[in-house]
Amino acid sequence: MTELRPAHEHPVTVSAETLAAMGEGEVAYVRTFQSEELMRLFPNAPELTPGHKFWALLSAGGHPIVLADTPQAVLKNAMEQNLLTVSVH
């Protein structure tokens, strides 16, 4: 068993890439997008009407898992995949 100590005694630096990899397959985050932003992020996506809000479930590493027009749909998908979800504000 590993003894835990307060961070100020033994600080540990973790890169964003390492932190993301630690949660890959276990943690996902929910984020909203406007249709205009989606078209820039996913140039191969079908053309969308500007001004619409979408919700995305992204892996800990930021890779898209599912995109939907309701938050309930992305949360349902996360639950089906046994992913812990967090929101990004």
Image (spheres, grey):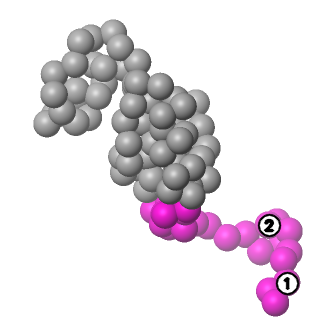
Query: Mark 2 falls on what kind of element?
Result: loop
Q: Is residue 57 above or below residue 13?
A: above
Picture coordinates of residue 23 (x, y %)? 55, 62
- CA–CA distance in space, label 1 to label 2: 12 Å
Q: Which residues are magenta?
A: 1-26
Picture coordinates of residue 11 (x, y %)? 73, 69
Is 43 on the left or on the right of 12, as rendered? left
Q: Is residue 20 above or below residue 65?
A: below
Instruction: Identify the residue shown where x is 14% and y is 36%.
Output: 44
Quadrant (top left/top right/bottom left/bottom right) for the C terminus: top right
Residue most extreme to the bottom: 1
What's the amino acid at mark 2?
Ala
Instruction: Identify the residue shown where x is 38% and y is 42%.
Output: 66
Q: Is residue 23 above or below residue 32?
A: below
User: Is the residue marked by circle 1 packed among few (<14), some (14-19), or many (20+) residues within 10 Å?
Assistant: few
To which residue does mark 1 refer? 3
Q: Does the rendering let one see residue 15? A: no
Q: What number of labels is visible? A: 2
Picture coordinates of residue 60 (x, y %)? 49, 55
What's the amino acid at mark 1?
Glu
Instruction: Identify the residue shown where x is 79% and y is 66%.
Output: 7
User: Is the residue marked by circle 2 packed among few (<14), some (14-19), or many (20+) residues within 10 Å?
Assistant: few
Instruction: Identify the residue shown where x is 56% and y is 55%.
Output: 83
Is 23 on the left or on the right of 41, as rendered? right
Choose mark 1 or mark 2, whichever is in front.
Answer: 1
To which residue does mark 2 refer? 7
Q: Main secondary structure of the magenta part?
A: loop
Give yes or no for residue 51 being in the magenta stretch.
no
